Amino acid sequence: MIRFIHCADLHLGRPIKTHADLPASFIKQLQSATYQSFESIVNKAIEFNVDFMLISGDVYDSEHRSYRGQWFLKKQAERLQKVNIPIYVIHGNHDPIKAEHSNNRLPENVHVFSEKFEVVSLLTAKNEKVYLYGFSYPNKAYYDNPIPMYETIGEMSAYHIALLHGQESSQKDHEPYAPFSLNELKQKNIDYWALGHIHKRQILSSNPSVVYPGNIQGAHKKENGEKGAYYVEMTKTDTMLTFLPTSRVQWEHMNISIDECEIMDELLDRIQQISEILDLQKHYLVEVHLTGGGPLHEQLIQDNVQQELMTILRSEVFHSSNVWINSLYVNTTLPIERERLKEKDDLLGDIVRVVDTLEEQHVEEALQPVFSHLVMRKYLECLSQEEIQEIVETAERKILTSLMREVK
């Protein structure tokens, strides 16, 4: 058996997007969150006495590597060196390897793969032979398919592990650097594909293991949920992955329904229950989406009410807690019986039926002029399927509510 930790996308030196009103305690926590997350990963490596650690690209957030990040990585590597744990590193599109980037300052237990494809081997303390394959990006924009390079060598009874920073063909939210397909990976004699680049953790295959661990610390609201690394225990017949949540600041997206809330106090009590489902050892930046339908809708759509509600949440409900309400969105309606409306032979019924038959490509076509605009496209990110669906649902609610108000 071999044991190792697989992490990726540390982005040391990356700024985290915050709100202007964020308390000083949160700002201080955010400034050190990424470093604390990686330190926790190193703690786990030492605790589990792993055979080695893998970092699959984007160690730094920029090719102009921060001095703090370089110093920090060196110190953490020295901790692992003291307990004889080697680290294998590739660099990605954010931190391509350059001639001026000397790795001589890193301790001897760190192997950084060069821009030329390499195969290195190690023998674990229990005499298990491991071959590791990988390369670092020579520049930021690397669009070649790298898979043909990953040809295994040595005895097949050994463990064969590949490090790769790139985009699998089904992933849509990132630049398609070092593109490849899952089928291409499966055709290689690799036991474990240690991937990086995609910030959402995913296990694309279990045989062989094809794993994106995600980034180690969310930097904005789209990078929500737990972040960390995978602890991997591997035999020649089985692989067990354990996710290690290590992020100190967590972005969360919470849907709070106003259904059955008759007065504002009831809604505030419902929002306050957020604290009961969170691990308050961490700090949370929460995006609250008010949903559902009910009598509070008419109050909530007023700008002054939304501002007052936000003030109450920040200064009273979550005062002196590790929860910060980063934003509040009102997606409520008057009480809508959608299935009943669908049966009606009128404009309201037509709208519901059109939404039910609307396909994703129709929405993308409607948004195309915005995303192809010479100025605006520079500031826009690709929309996920969930975001497109949310746009459609929000539009439907607003149209139905507006029409129902006119009918009243």
Image (spheres, helix red, strand yellow):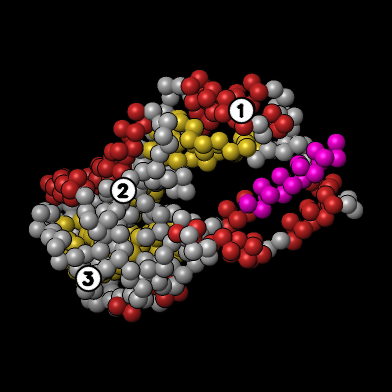
Tell me if mark 1 has few (under 14), some (14-19) or many (20+) residues whose alpha carbon lies within 10 angstroms of its own.
few
Residue that carries the numbered disc 2 in the rendered image: 14
Residue sitting at x 48%, y 22%:
315
Residue that carries the numbered disc 1 in the rendered image: 304
Q: Residue 295 occupies which quadrant of the picture?
A: top right
Residue extent of the magenta highlight:
391-408
Tell me if mark 3 has few (under 14), some (14-19) or many (20+) residues whose alpha carbon lies within 10 angstroms of its own.
some
Amino acid, disc 1: Asn
Residue sitting at x 42%, y 28%:
322
Residue 47 visible in image: no
On-image quarter of the N terminus: bottom left
Amino acid, disc 3: Glu
- Seen from the viewer's position, the closer of residues 339 and 188 is 339
Which x, y percent locates residue 233?
Answer: 33, 55
In this view, which residue lies farthest toward the front? 375
- Disc with the residue nearer the chain's start (1 vs 3): 3
Tell me if mark 2 has few (under 14), some (14-19) or many (20+) residues whose alpha carbon lies within 10 angstroms of its own.
some
Q: CA distance from mark 1 to mark 3?
A: 56 Å
In this view, which residue lies farthest toward the right? 345
Residue sitting at x 19%, y 59%:
124
Residue that carries the numbered disc 3 in the rendered image: 115
Which x, y percent locates residue 399?
Answer: 74, 47
Front label number (1 vs 3)? 1
